[in-house]
Amino acid sequence: MIDRSIAPKIHDAIEFDFKLPPIEKQQLSNGIPLYWLSGGVQEVAEIDWVFPAGMWYEQKPAVSNAVAALLKNGTSKHTAQQINEALEFYGAALKVNTGNDNCTVTLYTLTKHLPDLLPMVYEILTDAVFPEDELAIFKQNSIQRLMVNLRQPDFLANQRIDALLFGEFHPYGRFTKKEKIEALTREDLIAFYHATYNLSHVKMFMAGSIGEKEVGYLEEIFGKQRLMKTDLHQELFSAPGPSEKKHNVINDANGVQGAIRIGSLFPNRLHPDFAPMVVLNTILGGYFGSRLMSNIREDKGYTYGIHSSMASYVEGGSLTIQTEVGRDVIEPAIKEIYHEMQLLCNEPADEEELLLVKNYLLGNLLGDLDGPFSIIQRWRTLIVNGMTEEHFNRNIQVYKKITAKELQDLAKKYYQLENFYEVVVV
């Protein structure tokens, strides 16, 4: 019997073994790759269709976001209202999320409704028509939203730091402008849609209470169609930064708050330094107990929150520190940010702090491996970025075994202050 008078031993996350549960991989009859995982106790399913339909592939600014926003707004057979009513009738949700590289269309539904919903999704992915009236409403709403956002220092700062790092004409540095939205035409959307939302380019992921029967549904709806491959528009871009590293923008002469963004370019997740940098970035500003939070929020009281993040794309990445502070403490806050970066270069982290961060990262990872939806998302990230399970396993070992000395060497390599761009918007 268990002696309940004795408290169970508490284990650190670093002590656990981490294994990414396997998934099934197969091709539909027409060659579409399908990755799927059966699991969970609820009769629900998630299906993702991932297309190379992000900003990297657009020939005209703002078109990828417009296509993603209007994808569900009408086909040759059903109006936007009819599509939404069908989804609501079955208690399902169809989400469309686009980014710099890819667009992901995700269906959440009770498993039993898949035979009824998959034909509708297929219709949306192959027969969207982007009605003129829906485009007009989208353009009007987008411009109004943009005009409101342009009054916000944090919105402007986010635009400017990406433009500085990658270049304003680079897909990763390009930002939305009113005239670009106004210039969009239905023909632009249809051309981009047919080139990128082509089933010959899609990768499909399915998880939940599913099995061979549900795979059969996908085969029947998506696997029987003959695919006509299209050429994807891709250009070679460099990311030359301007010579001036510090940029100050007065957006509101009477503004009492300033948005600070400090950033530099960094390799994407395929680079061997990426996983070690995740640990270092977490120490600097990647969680609530980070050094930037402890100093600038808790000690100095300059901000409610400050965060350091890493962005990884197919063709590059970045490191960015972001916060909003009172106008009167902008310079002291920036000084303290650089001070914390230099401390990581000059002094190794103590073992207690390093263990805390390792447990934080691995503890979050435990949550990512709980449930079929989370697991399939982890696999999706690997597969879409051209990585294997071995990459996941290497990252685990990095998180567990990296030393304070290795992190200090990494800081010296990447926290060179002269490589960082600085944007302040008031």
Image (cartoon, rainbow, N blue to C red):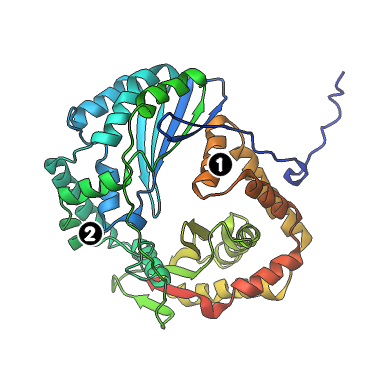
Mark yes or no: residue 305 visible: no
Picture disc at residue 147: 2
Q: Which residue is mark 1?
A: 378
Give the residue at the far bottom of this rendering.
243
At x 18% / y 27%, what residue is drawn? Answer: 77
Q: Is residue 78 above or below residue 70?
A: above
Amino acid, disc 2: Met
Q: Nearer the viewer, residue 13 or 239?
A: 239
Contact check, label 1 and label 2, Cβ < 8 Å: no
Q: Earlier in the sequence, mark 1 or mark 2?
A: 2
Mark 1 vs mark 2, CA separation in Å: 36 Å
Q: Quadrant of the N terminus?
A: top right
At x 38% / y 51%, what residue is drawn? Answer: 99
The mark closer to the camera, 1 or 2, is 1
Q: Is residue 322 above or below residue 17?
A: below
In the picture, measured across the screen, residue 76 lies left or right of residue 318, that is left
Q: Nearer the viewer, residue 99 or 233?
A: 233
Q: Quadrant of residue 153?
A: bottom left
At x 33% / y 65%, what residue is drawn? Answer: 156
In the picture, measured across the screen, residue 16 lies left or right of residue 313, that is right
Classify mark 1: helix, strand or loop.
Answer: helix
In the picture, measured across the screen, residue 84 lies left or right of residue 54, that is left
- The image shows residue 411 at horizontal and vertical percentages of 65, 70
Amino acid, disc 1: Arg
